[in-house]
Image (tube, rainbow, N blue to C red):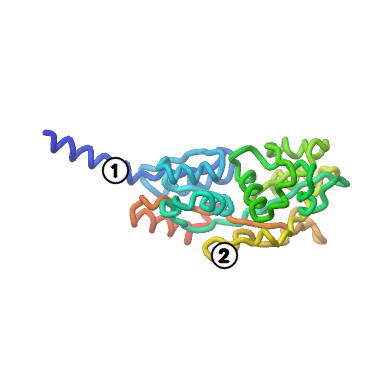
């Protein structure tokens, strides 16, 4: 009887180990929508919301989830500080660019990212644990002079309001470069706000032989002339637990490789 009980327990444990748990982002965000589409491709799957990329990586490492969507710069930042966890994470592939947008007050103290290297500058970097907050930490690690500025934990529309009022000098946002989205509409409609360039070459770090950030000219408004800003971009990336089966890792890789348009549209 005891042997049967142990066998049943083993089978249940094995079955549970095959369940796919995808950890994503806020329920209203694009990561959550993508996670739901990935989960649909697996039986016995579920989706978790999260505060951001670092929480997602930690859930993979601790076994609370086995598939995650993360910013690649946040993944690199985590592994730099927790190198022993690298063997618990399998890099699956990239989905799309996510760019860093610096919004500043028109006529204010910040004209470009070099002004973020001055003492006394206040920059909103998003809530603690958010992807943008980690981006700021990683930028400050690559270019230590950014540490002279004072980061404050404001994000979203609240951060824009703080910049417009002059309470903070600038705000960072890490998001998909789509000028039809709310961030671009809000900034372009407000004369007191503008997108400032990010061009510091010290941000040219690498992960698995490739740069974490690409330096790009990104369209921020629908304009035939101009309407662009120079900035840095990372990628939305899918990672998985190395505890998944070979079959599951193969299927997940196939989804990211061949059905990228479907899961990200």
Q: Residue furthest bottom?
A: 209
Q: Residue tagged by mark 1?
A: 15
Residue 193 quadrant:
top right
Mark yes or no: residue 88 visible.
Answer: yes
Q: Position of residue 41 (x, y in %)?
A: 41, 50
Out of 55 and 86, give the one closest to the viewer.
86
The residue located at (28%, 41%) in the rendering is 13
Q: Position of residue 27 (x, y in %)?
A: 55, 38
Out of 116 and 31, give the one closest to the viewer.
116
Q: Residue tagged by mark 2?
A: 210
Q: Is residue 66 above or below residue 211?
A: above
Element assignment for label 2: strand
* Horizontal arrangement in the rendering, residue 238 relative to residue 233 (left or right): left
- Quarter of the image with the N terminus in it: top left
Q: Position of residue 38 (x, y in %)?
A: 46, 49
Q: Residue furthest top?
A: 1
* Horizontal arrangement in the rendering, residue 87 relative to residue 15 (left or right): right
Task: Characterize the local packing of mark 2: few (<14), some (14-19) or many (20 or more) Cα atoms within 10 angstroms.
Answer: few
First of labels 1, 2 by sequence position: 1
């Amino acid at each position: 009887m005891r042997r049967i009980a142990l066998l049943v327990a083993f089978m249940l444990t094995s079955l549970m180990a095959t369940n796919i748990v995808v950890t994503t982002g806020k329920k209203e965000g694009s990561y959550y929508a993508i996670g739901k589409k990935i989960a649909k491709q697996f039986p016995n799957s579920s989706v978790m919301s999260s505060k951001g990329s670092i929480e997602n990586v930690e859930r993979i490492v601790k076994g609370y989830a086995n598939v995650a969507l993360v910013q690649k710069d946040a993944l690199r930042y985590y592994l730099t500080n927790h190198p022993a966890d690298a063997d618990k994470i399998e890099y699956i592939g990239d989905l799309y660019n996510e760019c860093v947008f610096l919004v500043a007050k028109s006529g204010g103290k910040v004209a470009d990212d070099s002004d973020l290297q001055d003492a006394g500058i206040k920059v909103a970097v998003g809530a603690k644990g958010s992807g943008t907050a980690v981006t700021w930490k990683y930028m400050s690690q690559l270019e230590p002079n950014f540490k002279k500025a004072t980061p404050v934990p404001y994000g979203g529309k609240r951060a824009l309001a703080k910049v417009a009022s002059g309470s903070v000098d600038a705000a960072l946002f890490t998001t998909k470069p789509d000028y039809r989205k709310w961030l671009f509409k809000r900034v372009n409609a407000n004369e007191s706000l503008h997108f400032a360039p990010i061009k510091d070459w010290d941000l040219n770090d690498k992960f698995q032989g490739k740069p974490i950030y690409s330096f790009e000219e990104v369209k921020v408004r629908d304009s035939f002339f101009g309407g662009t800003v120079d900035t840095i971009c990372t990628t939305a990336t899918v990672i998985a637990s190395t505890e998944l089966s070979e079959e599951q890792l193969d299927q997940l890789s196939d989804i990211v490789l061949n059905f990228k348009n479907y899961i990200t549209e």
